[in-house]
Amino acid sequence: MADLCNKVEENPMENGDEKEGEGVSRDGSLHGFESLHRLLSASLKPEIFKEVSRLLVGLNCGRVLETVALPESAVTHSSKYDFDVQAFCFHADKELLRQPRVVRVGLIQNSIALPTTAPFLDQKRAIMQKLKPVIDAAGASGVNILCLQEAWMMPFAFCTREKRWCEFAEPIDGESTQFLQDLARKYNMVIVSPILERDVNHGETLWNTAVVIGNHGNIIGKHRKNHIPRVGDFNESTYYMEGNTGHPVFETAYGKIAINICYGRHHPLNWLAFGLNGAEIVFNPSATVGELSEPMWPIEARNAAIVNSYYVGSINRVGTEVFPNPFTSGDGKPQHADFGHFYGSSYFSAPDASCTPSLSRCRDGLLISDMDLNLCRQLKDKWGFRMTARYDMYAELLSKYVKAEFEPQVIIDPLLQKKAL
């Protein structure tokens, strides 16, 4: 186990003065372990680990989350092509009037395939070649819906502020989509493909976009990232601005899905809007690093699944991407040539507060989960979050807040006013 993470990057560079934290190796492992769950499993007595795991990942319908056996071909692929593979099953309670609605869902996390100094076309096609066996493993495992990570077809170069990376942008029906359309048809699989989009019909404007490809290879639609970060090295507004597609939910052959791209996970109302539109599964394809966000990572999506009564699939890329030209973060620290370590750790969350262990922090991976979509309505009935919400009250406040003359509703202690006099 301890040497599994050593293949990710030969010479990752430090992000300025920042350090991942004591105990985190430069390859991204935790003292040589690929994830917190695996570290705890190896370090604690079984009876203690059982209780710790119950608190960390919860119980699904009152039971420990079950693992799923995958076909030998998928396991062989994971060994041959060196990617982590895990599979689990979320149950729902048995109902008298509805049959189970079980769908098999997959997430893929990956590092780039070539150095960022390689020709752009070579980089893009090398990533496709790298992902092909992982997608084949998903197909062989019977995955119905598969989601890739944010901007999967390129390095996450938006830290550099260099415009030459715009060359990776492509139209909705471009090379990446065509590559995945063939695989969607082959495996009867819905595929969510987050790309850097070039809108050829509107002045070749760039967008951070997720393309939803149907199980027949058709393009169902697209969603553009609603919230654009301006924090640390995330200089994405240099390349694209906030999306204009609202909060669409895509009704596929296997269920109603939505995509909350990356930074949108920090905005509770963004999660809420997808739920109000009827999503049963919301994907959060991301690219995020080290100390900036890792304490938030296991919390936000899981909380969204609970309060909105849907499943969430969270995907983060892996590895340290070093760029040719150093850049600064605008914080007075020395220039550096990398974003930091993308810590992977992709996972699923369920509306009953259970979640899967995460994938590796340092290797490519495929996470698969069976989900009974009946659980969404069962949790709505149990907790009544929709029924007890005060949308009229929230709407009234928000309608006032967006106006220039808004004044906060603050009641001041009269004694404070007397003291001021």
Image (cartoon, rainbow, N blue to C red):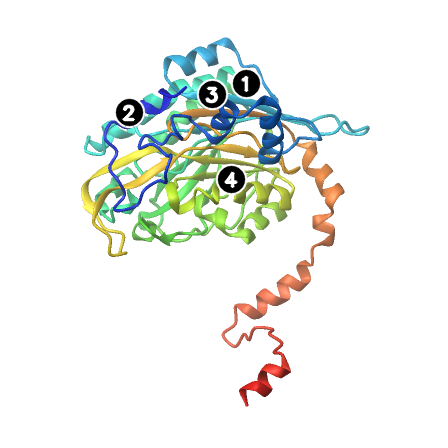
Q: 10 Å neighbourhood of mark 1: few (<14), some, or many (≥20)?
A: some
Which quadrant is home to the C terminus? bottom right
Q: Secondary structure at mark 4?
A: helix
| Among numbered discs 2 and 1, the one appearing first in the sequence | 2
Q: CA distance from mark 3 to mark 4?
A: 19 Å
**Relative height, residue 367 to residue 161 (above, below):** above
Q: Which residue is mark 3?
A: 85
Name the outermost residue toward the front. Answer: 45
Depth check, front residue: 195 or 65: 65
Q: CA distance from mark 2 to mark 4?
A: 30 Å
Disc number for residue 142:
1
**Label 2 amino acid?**
Ala
Q: Amino acid at mark 1?
A: Gly
Q: Earlier in the sequence, mark 1 or mark 3?
A: 3
Which amino acid, mark 3? Val
The residue to which callout 2 is attached is 126
In percent of the image, x 56 and y 53: which residue is there? 269
4 and 1 marks in contact (CB < 8 Å): no
Q: Residue at x 50, y 9 (%)?
A: 72
Which residue matches tag 4? 298
Q: Are marks 1 and 3 in contact (CB under 8 Å)?
A: no
Q: Which three-letter amino acid code belongs to the residue tagged 4?
A: Pro
Q: Position of residue 345 (x, y in %)?
A: 45, 33
